[in-house]
Amino acid sequence: MERPYPTDNEIILDSKRYIVSKTDPKGIIEYGNDYFVEISGYTESELIGKPHNIVRHPDMPRVAFKMMWDRILKGDNFIALVKNLAKDGSFYWVVTEFECKRDPLSNDIVSFTAFRKAAPRSAIDAIIPIYEKLKEIERGGGITASEKYFRGYLEDHNITYDEFINKTVGNSGMFKVFFTLMKKLFR
């Protein structure tokens, strides 16, 4: 499937609705709720069986996904602010929590579920310059240089990644309640 050319058209998400998708351990889509299908612009049959990066916007720094995979492959949850790409080239911003599911007998990771909610405008405005800087560093020095810069940025601000994302997103209590409820619904 050919990747769409990004446009400047932003899809404003309904703050009362949520997007859920589930992938196998390699990131292949196994499930997407109706809102995910609607917002992405793809049909369900176009999404199922495809890599989840089908909705990855090129404005996203690769290091964001490296950090995500590093954490979730260890079985740790991960929250991120993500700019996604719809089939028509439009984009939408989400706060996403990734959760892994393990096989109860082998303890192997069998799937990942991503729960998404509309990102607050203040969080989007705060993260854009950081993502632009990370993309610039990646163009010149690759993902390793970008990761070193971002880890240095966190150290310089004396915060962990989790503290950084909670501060950027704001209302972290509201998102924690949302993510907790979504996890209960999809178990």
Image: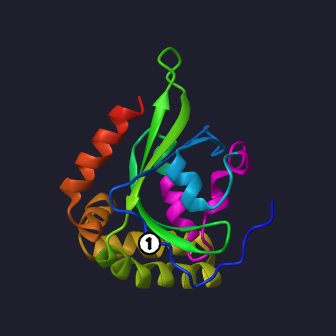
* Picture layout, residue 37 above or below residue 24: below
Q: Report whether 130 appears left or right of 24.
A: left
Q: Report whether 76 appears left or right of 52.
A: left
Relative to the observer, which residue lies in front, 181 or 158? 181
Give the farthest residue toward the top: 105
Q: How is the image coloured?
A: rainbow
| Location of residue 54 in the rendering, given as x and y in whole percent from the top left corner | 67, 59
Which region shows up in magenta? Answer: 45-69
Count the numbered circles shown: 1
Residue for badge 1:
12
Q: What secondary structure is the stretch in magenta mostly built from?
A: helix
Q: Is residue 50 magenta?
A: yes
Residue 60 visible somewhere in the drawing:
no
| Location of residue 146 in the rendering, given as x and y in whole percent from the top left corner | 52, 74
Identity of the residue drawn at 63% across and 84% down: 140
Which image quarter: residue 150?
Answer: bottom left
Query: Could you tell me the amino acid type at mark 1?
Result: Ile
Q: Quadrant of the C terminus?
A: top left
Task: Determine the secondary structure under disc 1.
Answer: loop
Answer few, some or many: residues within 10 Å of disc 1's Cα (few below 14, many 20 plus, some between 14 and 19).
few
Q: Report whether 22 appears left or right of 52.
A: left
Which image quarter: residue 139?
Answer: bottom right
